[in-house]
């Protein structure tokens, strides 16, 4: 179902009208809905680690590089994010903040395989990984839309674009957000949206955006087994 189909469904509910276009139209209703659809899609992507948006990145290591560009479609790490080593039975540890990263650079403890942090559009590892260690991690892509030719992109731009997540959720989001923007009663419509969102997220096997401290490893050093 295209984004135009979603828009048509919402328009019938809201205005009892059929719409023949969305992104090629200049009607105030169409223009406002373009913004609402974009906001709704971006919010949905942040709500859950959707399997449809989850991808794996493998870093190619040469024994001298410690800083790696993120994928072009990188959106964010999974909530339960880990960087996996291909030669050690334990994972890289995420640093708490850049201050800790600075301290580690000055006083590197003997932790195997090491630490990771993301800043400046790159994944940084410490110490420098071995040749062909090729660590990998899962991430959420920022490409939420599929074009008619099959390519993926971050936002809707044409009527034939397809949402990579649940289209009914997108339609319900359009309805309550438009009513909210117009100063109308939207509580029941928002509740319908939230019920559908909970149902879809429960069936999906990604992780919800609730972070917890899962690591009990002493940062002064750990034992590990090389694979």
Image (cartoon, rainbow, N blue to C red):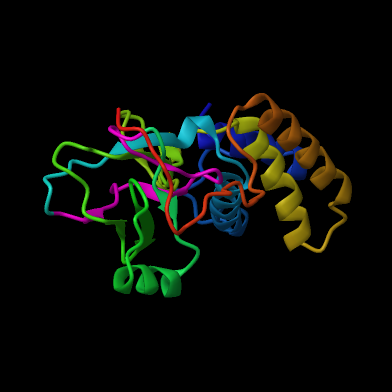
Of 67 and 158, the residue lying toward us: 67
Of 22 and 193, the residue lying toward us: 193
- Tell me where residue 118 appears, x and y as whole percent: 37, 59
Residue 201 in the magenta stretch? The answer is no
User: Is residue 131 toward the left or the right of residue 140 in the image?
Assistant: left
Q: What residue appears at the point 33 percent right and 46 percent down from the top-left corner?
A: 113
For residue 103, which quarter of the picture? bottom left
As displayed, is residue 154 above or below residue 97? above
Residue 76 in the magenta stretch? The answer is yes
Of 126 and 26, the residue lying toward us: 126
Q: Where's the C terminus, which quadrant?
A: top left
User: Is residue 55 toward the left or the right of residue 20 in the image?
Assistant: left
- Tell me where residue 160 appears, x and y as whole percent: 43, 34
Of 137 and 99, the residue lying toward us: 99
- Tell me where residue 194 appears, x and y as whole percent: 77, 41
- Tell me where residue 36 appears, x and y as whole percent: 61, 54
Q: What residue appears at the point 56 percent right and 56 percent down from the top-left corner?
A: 27
Q: What residue appears at the point 31 percent right and 38 percent down from the top-left corner?
A: 57
Q: Magenta region: which residues?
A: 65-88
Which SS does the magenta portion mostly show?
loop
Residue 161 in sight from this viewpoint: no
As displayed, is residue 227 above or below residue 106? above
């Amino acid at each position: 179902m295209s984004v135009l189909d979603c828009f048509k469904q919402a328009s019938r509910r809201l205005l009892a009208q059929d719409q023949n276009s969305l992104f090629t139209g200049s009607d105030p209703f169409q223009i406002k809905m373009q913004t609402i659809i974009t906001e709704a899609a971006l919010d949905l992507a942040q709500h859950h680690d959707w399997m449809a948006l989850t991808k794996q990145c493998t870093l190619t290591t040469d024994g001298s590089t410690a800083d790696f560009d993120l994928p072009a479609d990188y959106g964010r790490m999974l909530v339960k994010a880990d960087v996996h080593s291909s030669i050690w039975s334990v994972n890289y540890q995420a640093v708490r903040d850049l201050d800790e990263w600075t301290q580690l650079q000055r006083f590197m403890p003997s932790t195997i395989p090491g630490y990771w942090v993301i800043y400046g559009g790159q994944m940084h590892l410490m110490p420098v990984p071995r040749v062909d260690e090729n660590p990998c991690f899962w991430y959420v892509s920022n490409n939420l839309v599929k074009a008619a030719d099959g390519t993926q992109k971050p936002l809707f731009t044409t009527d034939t674009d397809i949402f990579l997540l649940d289209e009914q959720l997108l339609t319900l989001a359009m309805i309550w957000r438009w009513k909210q923007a117009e100063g109308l009663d939207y509580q029941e419509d928002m509740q319908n949206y939230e019920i559908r969102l909970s149902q879809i997220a429960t069936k999906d096997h990604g992780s919800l955006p609730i972070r917890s401290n899962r690591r009990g490893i002493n940062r002064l050093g750990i034992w590990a087994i090389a694979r």
